[in-house]
Image (cartoon, rainbow, N blue to C red):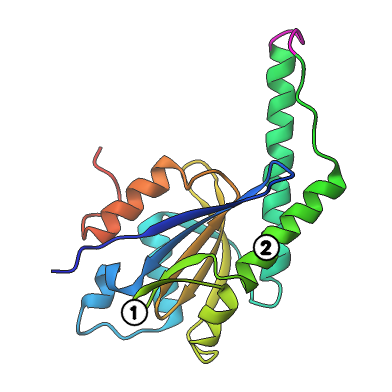
């Protein structure tokens, strides 16, 4: 009996408060792929994944500009976190010392390093046969250039921004947060368990 599963890993910077969180879902854990009548098509895969995970599309990206979109996602998350830290400081009456912020240049350099690692270094836990650490470039090259999709979207509950990469061997969710969020995590678990997409009321 095959047990459905997904894998998570986080790439973090040593020198700036930025990170890239990855979730990979192998094809064998996607219930629809186990249906003998299912015929793979990237548009069908996209529709199923977005419906099951309650994601709405923000931008139909492509692999050529995915690097820049991921970089923007990390930098926007960092800026949002910095503003929230400043608000907490102000709400507390400014009695504490506001943590020193990383320089803009440091953040951009470190974010670029993470994105480059995602593309060119074997840091993604990706399962074909067997589970291995791979780079996005290697994963994409194994498809022969067909059946690949790259998208930007938001989780409806909470508005978490994500980059989504779909290939015949599975899917990769990329976010800048420390995790994928409780709502998305619950939907992902229910989907691969073959349960309804929406959590019980």
Q: Viewer-proximal residue, 152 or 121?
A: 121
124 drawn magenta = no
Placement of the C terminus among the 4 image quadrants: top left
Q: Viewer-proximal residue, 146 or 110?
A: 110
Q: Which mark is residue 157?
A: none
Task: Using the rendered view, name the quadrant where residue 130 is placed.
Answer: bottom left
Number of numbered discs visible in the structure rendering: 2
Residue 112: x percent and y percent? 75, 60
Helix, strand or loop for the magenta stretch, by majority: loop
- Outermost residue toward the bottom? 144
Residue 125: x percent and y percent? 45, 65
Task: Using the rendered view, name the quadrant where residue 101 is placed.
Answer: top right
Q: Viewer-proximal residue, 197 or 104?
A: 104
Find disc 1 in the rendering and name its residue: 129
Find disc 2 in the rendering and name its residue: 115
Residue 166: x percent and y percent? 48, 73
Residue at 67 percent across and 63 percent down: it is 115
Residue at 59 percent across and 78 percent down: it is 137
The reply to whether residue 60 is visible in this rendering is no
Residue at 74 percent across and 45 percent down: it is 15
Residue 139: x percent and y percent? 51, 79
- Outermost residue toward the left? 1
Is 150 above or below relative to 153?
below
Q: Earlier in the sequence, mark 2 or mark 1?
A: 2
State which region is magenta.
92-96
The residue carrying pointer 2 sits among few (fewer than 14), some (14 to 19) or many (20 or more) residues within 10 Å by Cα, namely: many
């Amino acid at each position: 009996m095959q047990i459905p599963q997904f894998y998570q890993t986080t790439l973090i910077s040593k020198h700036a408060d930025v990170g890239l969180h990855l979730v990979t879902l192998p094809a064998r854990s996607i219930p629809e792929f186990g249906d003998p009548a299912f015929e793979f098509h990237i548009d069908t895969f996209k529709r199923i994944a977005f419906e099951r995970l309650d994601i709405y599309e923000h931008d139909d990206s492509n692999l050529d500009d995915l690097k820049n979109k991921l970089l923007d996602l990390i930098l926007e998350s960092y800026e949002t976190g910095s503003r929230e830290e400043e608000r907490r400081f102000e709400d507390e009456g400014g009695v504490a010392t506001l943590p020193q912020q990383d320089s803009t240049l440091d953040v951009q350099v470190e974010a670029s390093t993470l994105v480059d690692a995602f593309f060119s270094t074997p840091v993604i836990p990706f399962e074909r046969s067997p589970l291995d650490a791979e780079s996005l470039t290697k994963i994409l090259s194994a498809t022969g250039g067909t059946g690949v999709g790259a998208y930007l979207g938001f989780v409806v509950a909470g508005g978490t921004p994500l980059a989504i990469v779909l290939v015949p061997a599975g899917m990769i969710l990329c976010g800048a947060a420390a995790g994928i969020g409780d709502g998305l995590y619950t939907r992902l678990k229910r989907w691969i368990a073959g349960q309804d997409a929406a959590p019980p009321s």
